[in-house]
């Protein structure tokens, strides 16, 4: 009798887990589909906008610095850098002390 009950529970648990897992997977897929649909709509709007002359002109002016015939393009260059008025003294490199010199410094420190 107990084995029959355990067998029935065993047969009911696995399909229930599979059903719950599939339901969760379905809801995740629906959420992803919604996000992709929104992105697709935004891209469609961008494609339509890119087919207009005004958008093409705006991009040409912005990205490639193009001008219409009769217009003059100006470029503002950075000015010359100011000369440094202060000088920095170079410090000579420190001599590397040997082992005995460092040991003597440590011992003489305590006197």
Image (tube, rainbow, N blue to C red):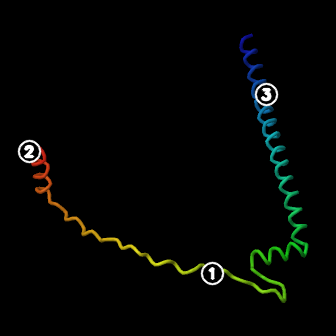
The residue shown at (78%, 86%) is 72
Across and down, in percent, residue 47 comes to: 87, 67
Across and down, in percent, residue 10 comes to: 74, 23
Q: Is residue 26 above or below residue 12?
A: below
Question: Which residue bears the numbered disc 2?
Answer: 111
Q: Is residue 33 left or right of residue 84?
A: right
Residue 12, quarter of picture: top right
Across and down, in percent, residue 49 comes to: 89, 67
Q: Nearer the viewer, mark 3 or mark 1?
A: 1
Q: Is residue 89 left or right of residue 42?
A: left
Q: Earlier in the sequence, mark 1 or mark 2?
A: 1
Q: CA distance from mark 2 to mark 3?
A: 83 Å
Question: Which residue bears the numbered disc 3?
Answer: 16
Asked whether 14 or 3 is in front, the reply is 14
- Label 1's element? loop
The residue shown at (72%, 15%) is 3
Asked whether 89 or 17 is in front, the reply is 89
Asked whether 60 or 81 is in front, the reply is 81
In the rendered image, which quarter contains the C terminus? Answer: top left
The residue shown at (82%, 39%) is 27
Across and down, in percent, residue 79 comes to: 58, 80
Question: Which residue bears the numbered disc 1?
Answer: 77
Q: Are marks 3 and 1 in contact (CB under 8 Å)?
A: no
Q: Residues within 10 Å of mark 1 (few under 14, many from 20)?
A: few
Q: CA distance from mark 1 to mark 2?
A: 65 Å
Q: Are marks 2 and 3 in contact (CB under 8 Å)?
A: no
**Residue 90: assigned label:** none
In the rendered image, which quarter contains the N terminus? Answer: top right
């Amino acid at each position: 009798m107990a084995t029959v009950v355990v067998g029935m529970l065993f047969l009911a648990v696995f399909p229930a887990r599979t059903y719950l897992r599939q339901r969760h997977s379905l809801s995740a897929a629906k959420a992803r589909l919604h996000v992709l649909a929104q992105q697709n709509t935004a891209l469609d709007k961008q494609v339509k906008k890119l087919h207009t002359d005004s958008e093409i002109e705006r991009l040409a002016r912005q990205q490639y610095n193009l001008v219409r015939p009769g217009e003059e393009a100006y470029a503002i260059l950075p000015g010359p850098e100011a000369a440094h008025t202060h000088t920095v003294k170079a410090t000579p490199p420190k001599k590397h002390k040997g082992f005995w010199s460092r040991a003597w410094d440590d011992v003489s420190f305590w006197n």
